Image (spheres, rainbow, N blue to C red):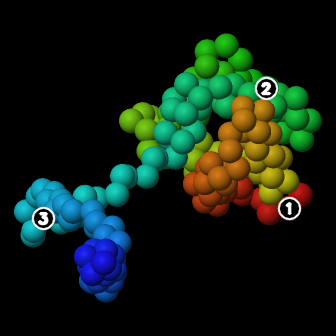
């Protein structure tokens, strides 16, 4: 009978001992993996951020500028405030005017074009252009930009580039 009690007693002791030593096995932690990356020499400068696009690129390049100029010329021709100023621009003269305007905008916005026309002061000397005519011209340009779906930021940037020309073009401050 002692053996009968001895076997269960041993099992109880072994069980208690196993329980006291941790009982159930602990979950294994995942092995640590070292990752070594080669980021180049330690003294290398971080890469430069990409260069922002020029206004020329944001406008869509020379072809897109030419479309805006075509629309602008149509708007001016329909604008009774200023269309008389442009009445003599027909045929080759109109083509030269549009080419000069495209080249001027292209160059001013960062494109590779070269404007070969007269300075704004020389081109408008003695014309006695008034403030309200300048404003009508800007409105015709704004409408041309909108008709060609140019974003507002680009419109504002272009107008900011062209605005200083007012001092060379407008001679008469009266309406």
| Of residues 76 and 173, the one drawn nearer to the viewer in this rendering | 76
**Which residue is under mark 2?**
74
Extreme front residue here? 1
| Disc 2 from disc 3: Cα separation | 55 Å
Residue 64 lies in quadrant: top right
Element at label 3: loop
* 2 vs 1, front mark: 2
**Secondary structure under badge 2?**
helix
Q: Earlier in the sequence, mark 2 or mark 3?
A: 3
Quadrant containing the N terminus is bottom left
- Find disc 3 in the rendering and name its residue: 44
Q: Residue at horizontal 20%, vertical 65%?
A: 32
Task: Assign the C terminus to one quadrant of the image.
Answer: bottom right
Name the side, left or right, on which 76 lies relative to 116. Answer: right
Judging by the rendered image, the residue that carries numbered circle 1 is: 174
Q: What percent of the width, then of the height, locates residue 26?
A: 32, 72
Q: Quadrant of residue 30?
A: bottom left
Q: Foreground residue, 63 or 3?
A: 3
Q: Is residue 87 left or right of residue 119?
A: right
């Amino acid at each position: 009978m002692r053996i009968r009690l001895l076997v269960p007693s041993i099992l109880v002791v072994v069980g208690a001992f196993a329980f006291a030593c941790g009982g159930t096995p602990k979950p294994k932690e995942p092995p640590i993996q070292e990752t070594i990356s080669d980021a180049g020499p330690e003294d290398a400068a971080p890469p430069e951020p990409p260069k922002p696009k020029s206004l020329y690129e944001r406008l869509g390049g020379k072809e897109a500028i030419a479309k805006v100029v075509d629309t602008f010329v149509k708007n001016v021709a329909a604008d009774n405030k200023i269309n008389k100023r442009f009445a003599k621009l027909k045929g080759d003269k109109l083509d030269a005017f549009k080419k000069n305007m495209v080249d001027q905008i292209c160059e001013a916005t960062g494109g590779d074009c070269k404007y070969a026309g007269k300075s704004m002061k020389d081109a408008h000397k003695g014309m006695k252009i008034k403030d309200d005519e300048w404003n009508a011209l800007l409105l015709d340009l704004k409408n041309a930009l909108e008709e060609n779906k140019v974003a507002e930021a680009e419109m504002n940037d272009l107008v900011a580039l062209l605005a200083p020309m007012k001092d060379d073009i407008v001679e008469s401050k009266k309406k």
